[in-house]
Amino acid sequence: MLERAPFRIVSRDNEVPVRKAAEVLVRKVPEDQQTIEIRVAVLGSVDVGKSTVLGVLTQGELDNGRGSARLNLFRHLHEIQTGHTSSISREILGFSSQGQPVTYRHCRTAEEMCDISTKLITFIDLAGHQKYLRTTVFGLTGHSPHFVMLVVNAASGMTGTGRDHLALALALQVPLAVVVNKVDTVTTTVLARTLTQLYSFLKGPACKKVPMEVLNEDDALTAASSMVSENVVPVFLVSCVHGDGLNLLYTFLNVLPPGHTPKERDYLMQLDPEFQIDETFQVPEVGPVVGGLLTRGVLREDDTLLAGPAHDGAFYPIRVISVQRNRVPCRLVRAGESATLALDIGDAPPGLL
């Protein structure tokens, strides 16, 4: 896919004819892969607006200032009542071949979004409260995100839990981007103090990162290409109520590189399949369903796997009945992709899954 960016006029002393330079983004989608998928874990302390940021990005509509954008991400009644995420929820954001964001404002279902998108960002919304830290650690390790988006409150800056989440991302060596949220609620002086605290923390001996404030589209393109190799941490200033900085964040996510190189992906696909189970369900008229990540190999419908270990330490054969990715039926799953599998456990003990 070729996307032509706005051209710039280049001239010397009003020479004629005027020459032009164009910037072109080339995105290669493998022939056997419908979309490029990237997993982004969203971290941050409680009350920084993580779920609100994701709601605005994926729904395509601004927040009303009272948290309306986050309601679609909550999974439990107590989360809606308290406004605090206690579980792991996932949402997707697509990008078309022209680089335009594809949200639920344009599509009614995830299946429709997957059909018209050439790139999918899977956001993993994790808990911010300290008492749910185990859930957050499980989301970071079990879901294997390619990138981390750390959300910081423009008023309070980096608090204790936010620092813990940053330390987790650094320990796991996951590339990091920072979103300073609620910039519309603070004065210029308070925002400058928050950024100074953030930059000093990122530059310190514990992090040794290079913060880069994203002010325009060129900064977003540069940050996406250099955050992995040059220890750059992009910093975005956004407002979910007024929409400040959201276009730059969309641009950054659009050009974010895949987590694995083609050579690494080909190597993993040649190995025997290994599916890491994160969640289990019992669906009426379907049976046991598991959700998780295929860490290596290729998995197809009707494949037979060994599941375990059970309580006796043994592994039992099970059969894959059907496969879904992003709530859309598919024929196979490749290494590095998350999916849900409907299983026929046969004679395996009931407590195996």
Image (cartoon, helix red, strand yellow):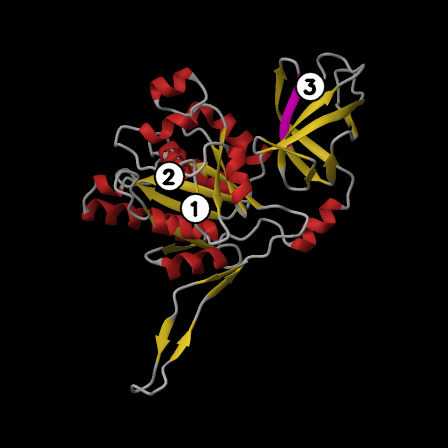
Q: Quadrant of residue 6?
A: bottom left
Separation (CA) of disc 3 from disc 1? 37 Å
What amino acid is at disc 2?
Answer: Gly
Label whose residue precedes the other's in the sequence (2 or 1): 2
**Element class at badge 3:** loop
Q: Quadrant of residue 42?
A: top left
Label whose residue precedes the other's in the sequence (3 or 2): 2
Q: Nearer the viewer, residue 169 or 228?
A: 228
Q: Residues within 10 Å of mark 2 (few under 14, many from 20)?
A: some
Residue receiving disc 3: 353
Circles 3 and 2: CB atoms closer than 8 Å: no
Label whose residue precedes the other's in the sequence (3 or 1): 1
Q: Nearer the viewer, residue 268 or 8?
A: 8
**Element class at badge 1:** strand
Q: Quadrant of the N terminus?
A: bottom right
Q: Which mark is residue 101?
A: 1
Q: Where are the magenta residues, as a range? A: 286-292
| Rendered position, 1 above or below 181 | below
Q: Quadrant of the C terminus?
A: top right
What amino acid is at disc 3?
Answer: Leu
Q: Nearer the viewer, residue 16 or 275?
A: 16
Residue 229 shows in the view: yes
Q: Residue at x 25, y 42 (%)?
A: 242
Q: Residue at x 42, y 41 (%)?
A: 150
Separation (CA) of disc 2 from disc 1? 9 Å
Image spot of residue 53 (x, y percent): 37, 37
Image spot of residue 215 (x, y percent): 32, 56
Circle 3 or circle 2, nearest the eye: 2
Residue receiving disc 2: 60
